[in-house]
Amino acid sequence: MRSMTTKDVTSSCRDFFLAGWTVADVLHALDWMPDGTPWPHSGAPETKDAWRLRGWMRHRLGAWRTEAGEPLRSRDQQAAARHADQLRQGEAERRRVLERQAERAAQLSQGDSPIKVTALAQIRALFDSGRRKTRPARNLE
C-alpha cells in the first residue's frame, strides 16, 4: 500500500469513514469477507502500481456494500448493535418481571381471591364434618 498516496487511500475508503467505520474496521474488511471467512490469497498484491492497489481495495471493500452501494455495518458496528439489542432485551425482561411482581403484590393487597375463599370454606367444612363423626357423644345427664 506504500505506493498509494494518502489521497488514494482516503478516497478509496471515504464513504466507509463517513458511515462511521474506523481504520481498524477497514483493515478488517480488507482481510475478511462479511460472512466471517478470510479472503482467499490474503494480503495486498505485490505491486508498486497504485491503480492495481486501488482496484484491489475497491474489490475487497465492494463485498462490504449493499446492492445500492452503501457500506454495510462494520464488524464493530455490528457488535455494538448486538450489544445494544441485548441490553434492550434485558431491560424489557426486567420490566416484565417488575410488572408481574407489581400485579402479584396488588392481588395480595386486595385480600383473598374468591376462589381461595371458596376453597378454604370447603376445606373447613370437610374438617368440621370429620370432627363431628369422630367426637364421642356427650352425656348431658
Image: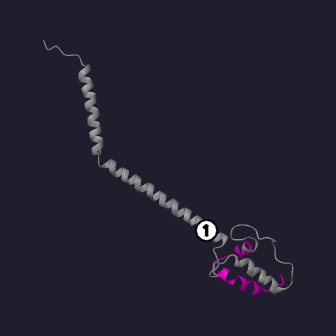
Say which residue label 1 marks.
Answer: 80
Quadrant where the C terminus is found in the figure? top left
Q: Is residue 21 left or right of residue 48?
A: left
Residue numbers of the magenta segment? 1-28
Q: Is residue 61 above or below residue 122?
A: below
| Residue 133 within the magenta-colored segment of the rendering | no
The secondary element bearing badge 1 is classed as helix
Residue at image coords 67%, 80%: 17
Q: Vertical placement of 117 versus 87: above or below?
A: above
Question: Measured from the top left, where is residue 90 in percent x and y?
Answer: 52, 59
Percent x, y of residue 87: 54, 62
Of 93 and 60, which appears nearest the observer? 60
84 left or right of 53 in image? left
Side of 48 where 33 appears, left or right: left
Q: Quadrant of residue 16?
A: bottom right
Which residue is the extreme one toward the front?
67
Q: Residue at x 76, y 86 (%)?
A: 8
Looking at the image, which residue is at 33% across and 47% down?
Answer: 108
The crowding category of the residue bearing disc 1, from other C-alpha atoms within 10 Å (few below 14, some 14 to 19, many at least 20), is: few
Check the image and report above or below for 125 versus 77: above
